[in-house]
Image: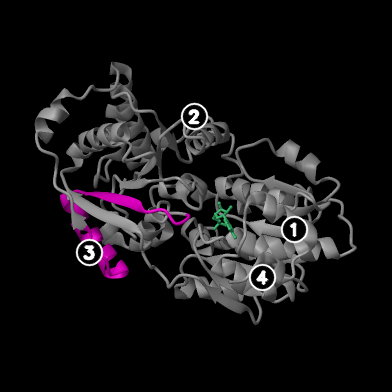
Amino acid sequence: MSYFSDLGLAEPILRALEEKGYNDPTPIQRQAIPALLEGRDLLGIAQTGTGKTAAFMLPSLHRLAQESTGRYPQGCRMLVLSPTRELAAQIADNARAYARFLNLSVQTVFGGVPVSKQINALRRGVDILVATPGRLLDLIEQRALVLDHVGIFVLDEADQMMDLGFIKPLTRIANLLPRQRQSLFFSATMPDEIAQLGKRFITDPVKVEVAPQSTTAERVDQFATFIEQKEKQALLTLTLQKGLASGEIESCLVFTRTKHGADRVVRHLIAAGIEAAAIHGNKTQAQRTRALDGFRAGRIPVLVATDIAARGIDVPGVSAVFNFEIPNVPEQYVHRIGRTARAGRSGLAISYVAPDEKSYIRDIQRLTGVQLSPAPLPKDFVAQAARLPKPSRKAAGAEHSDERREGRGGNSNRRQRAKNSRPKRNPDARVTPRGERSEGQSRRQRRRPNRAKSQS
Ligand code: AMP
């Protein structure tokens, strides 16, 4: 057993960790911190939940605090790239907590919030900048930010960056970074294309891997219910009514494949008296923050999310994950169920499998080596389902039009669907990279044409 003090971190950082209640480093922290303190590059294969943020942030803070260089106007000394706004905000929050007793500034830049505030915040320069790639490049183009002084560069969740189609922005950013720097590259999985991307950023890295690739969280009990698509909503509502009332489920994440699907599930749950909120790319940043804060604080027990919006989010108390739709990329399943069973707790993952999703389950079982236990439909399911309230007429009307837009497998009216599903006023639209909006389909999914057929 080692303690943080054994790793050579400066006293103000140790004090902040004590305040946070961290006693011992996690395995990735034990492996990464000494090498990073020496200034080595790092290739980390680790998911969120392993303590990877502190693994890269603590030694970086130590090094930044030691250097006597000040801030550079419109510059930053450490740049962390994150695929999503939520993860960026979370990383920055952690950095601020760890840097509490240091004189280091932390700033975020991501879409969905006015760019002018970010331009102002950058004017005098910052120590640590946490950014999503689209807004970062936007600020560089507006001459509000330069990357000439980046001494530490972190690329987090590289596999999701690729899924979101960020390869071009990343390449542009790589070309703007100074050659002389420390680089850290993290990904939950390391297929060949990600490893190739890594080579553009890191040199002679120390490699740390905390969980074998694609390992399913061991403490998660995993079930599958085979069910028709149109019956899934009733089953979810009934299961949540029972689970929340008995305390078996305290808080849960429900994953849908599409943004409209997430909204529809929320409408049904609310009609049945279950507090729920949706989080996806069509929501404003304020809505996303409100939903996430409510969920974290326990006011909203059910958060319905698309993969992209939920990825990387750290909420320690999630007791269950529902796969309302099965991801057609098996690695995504591993990411989803990794949201539960955090911090030593046990967890529950329930997958609702429609007939056309059975092959996805086979792929998932092959990847994880875990057989999902069958969970039968409750007795009297049909009768109980018939008694469930429907969402209000107005909402039901909207739902109907959603149904048309999302028509499973239908290719007709695609342009109209795309038009309808576009948010009316997306403040982010000019600056948000393509991927932050397109939760329904990732690049990897598109590479599987047969599978992608049933996508909306
Ligand atoms: P991360 O993988 O960085 O998202 O971290 C997952 C969670 O573990 C976060 O809530 C951290 O605050 C927490 N955490 C990180 N390191 C430690 C530690 N050494 N001891 C206890 N909790 C930690």
- Per the rendered image, the range of residues in magenta is 343-372
Q: Is residue 137 visible?
A: no
Residue 454's x, y, as percent? Answer: 26, 50
Ligand 1 position by quadrant: bottom right
- Compare marks 1 and 4 and give the one earlier in the sequence: 1
Residue identified by numbered label 3: 371
Q: Are marks 1 and 4 in contact (CB under 8 Å)?
A: no
* Mark 4: amino acid: Ile
* Mark 2: amino acid: Lys
Q: Is residue 450 visible?
A: yes
Which label lies toward us, 1 or 4? Answer: 1
Which label lies toward us, 2 or 3? Answer: 3
Which label lies toward us, 2 or 1? Answer: 1
Residue identified by numbered label 1: 13
- CA distance for labels 4 and 3: 36 Å
Q: Are marks 2 and 1 in contact (CB under 8 Å)?
A: no
Nearer-the-camera pick, 74 or 384:
384
- Compare marks 2 and 1 and give the one earlier in the sequence: 1
Residue 14 in the figure: left or right of residue 407: right
- Count residues near mark 2 (Cα–Cα under 10 Å), then give few for <14, some for 14-19, many for 20+: few
Badge 4 marks a residue whose secondary structure is: helix
Badge 1 marks a residue whose secondary structure is: helix
- Residue 192 in the magenta stretch? The answer is no
Residue identified by numbered label 2: 424
* Residue found at x 55% / y 36%: 289
